[in-house]
Image (spheres, rainbow, N blue to C red):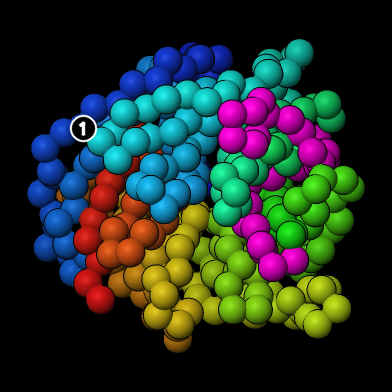
């Protein structure tokens, strides 16, 4: 998620008309090794509410993104063309009671092998807040309600157990929901997930027998083991010192990961021992990065421009093996 205290009220109710332009590569910063060839592949229209929050990739090169403020799910082609797949219904009160933010937003997204998309919608209302599903060619439908006084944010799918994990940034909770839908269960409420003034549990991934989650306010990466009976084990802090940390992605090298640092306008490479270094920065074109995904040697980074108020975009970079 993002630091949104500086967002103007005028932008809150804006609806989006999808548009993106493929531009020439942006120059890479000196700090970008071991990432190289950083380039902005698509620019989004901030005035139309195109604030990309989360991303799910397909094997064919497409990216599915949530445009948070537009309440939309969109598909971005390998050439940068944007096609809006769905716009979620606006709450009756306009979403003014959405916790921490005051406007409704689409947040985490993940994709199953059969092409089904699962995503989160936070509105501050009981009739809309929750986990949503959209099958290929279908319409979005809510499959599980989540508390209206929370802010569901990060989302991950454990395909082996058909379980969705949800990070709630306000309630400091990790929820579980079956992919078939139903009642959400509070899986972990450890104090390490709680916010410290604004947002707590944020980005979330399932990796190597555990649920990994960031804490935005505390600048930490946590590992919560999944026990044999499916319950949550004791949370472990695996990295710290990165306030404003949002979503992240594992690189395929053990527990090494790349993390989006929203407020710092950076992407950090976090080693398995918790040490971290900057590998992309605002010099590369980052504008409050929110989400990261990897396909092969290509790194995808979304920037929402929540605070910079300039140039939300999709950046691609090459990762050295």
Helix, strand or loop status at disc 1: loop
Q: Residue at x 65, y 69 (%)?
A: 211
> Which corner quadrant holds the C terminus?
bottom left
Depth check, front residue: 281 or 230: 230
Q: Where in the figure is residue 45, as x and y percent of width and height? A: 34, 23
Depth check, front residue: 117 or 153: 117
Depth check, front residue: 166 or 240: 166
Q: Is residue 36 above or below residue 307?
A: below
Q: Where in the figure is residue 227, as x and y percent of width and height? A: 78, 80
Q: Residue at x 81, y 41 (%)?
A: 144
Q: Which residues are magenta?
A: 134-161
Q: Residue at x 40, y 80 (%)?
A: 253
Q: Where in the figure is residue 120, as x and y percent of width and height? A: 66, 40
* Left or right of residue 38, residue 173 in this image: right
Q: How many marks?
A: 1
* Residue 250 part of the magenta-drawn span: no
Q: Residue at x 79, y 38 (%)?
A: 143
* Left or right of residue 285, residue 108 in this image: right
**Which residue position holds label 1?**
22
Q: Where in the figure is residue 285, as x and y percent of width and height? A: 22, 44
Note whether residue 197 is visible: no
């Amino acid at each position: 998620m993002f630091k949104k205290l500086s967002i103007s009220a005028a932008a809150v109710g804006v609806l989006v008309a999808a548009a993106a332009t493929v531009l020439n590569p942006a120059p890479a910063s000196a700090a970008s090794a071991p990432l190289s060839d950083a380039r902005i592949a698509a620019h989004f229209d901030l005035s139309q509410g195109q604030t990309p929050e989360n991303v799910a990739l397909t094997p064919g090169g497409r990216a599915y993104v949530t445009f948070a403020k537009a309440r939309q799910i969109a598909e971005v082609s390998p050439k940068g063309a944007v096609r809006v797949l769905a716009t979620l219904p606006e709450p009756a009160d306009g979403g003014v009671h959405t916790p921490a933010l005051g406007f409704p937003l689409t947040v985490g997204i993940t994709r199953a092998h059969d092409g089904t998309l699962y995503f989160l919608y936070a509105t501050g209302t009981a009739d809309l807040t929750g986990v949503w599903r959209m099958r290929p060619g279908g319409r979005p439908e809510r499959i599980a309600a989540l508390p209206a006084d929370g802010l569901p944010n990060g989302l991950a799918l454990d395909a082996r157990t058909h379980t969705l994990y949800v990070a709630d940034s306000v309630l400091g909770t990790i929820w579980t929901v079956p992919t078939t839908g139903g009642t959400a269960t509070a899986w972990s409420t450890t104090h390490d997930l709680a916010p410290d003034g604004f947002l707590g549990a944020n980005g979330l991934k399932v990796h190597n027998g555990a649920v990994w989650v960031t804490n935005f306010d505390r600048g930490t990466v946590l590992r919560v083991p999944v026990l044999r009976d499916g319950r949550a084990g004791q949370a472990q802090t695996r990295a710290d010192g990165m306030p404003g940390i949002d979503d992240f992605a594992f690189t395929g090298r053990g527990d090494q990961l790349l993390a989006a640092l929203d407020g710092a306008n950076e992407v950090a490479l976090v080693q398995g021992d918790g040490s971290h270094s900057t590998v992309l920065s605002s010099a590369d074109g980052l504008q409050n990065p929110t989400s990261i995904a990897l396909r092969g040697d290509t790194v995808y980074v979304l920037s929402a421009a929540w605070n910079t108020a300039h140039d939300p975009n999709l950046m691609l970079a090459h990762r050295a093996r």
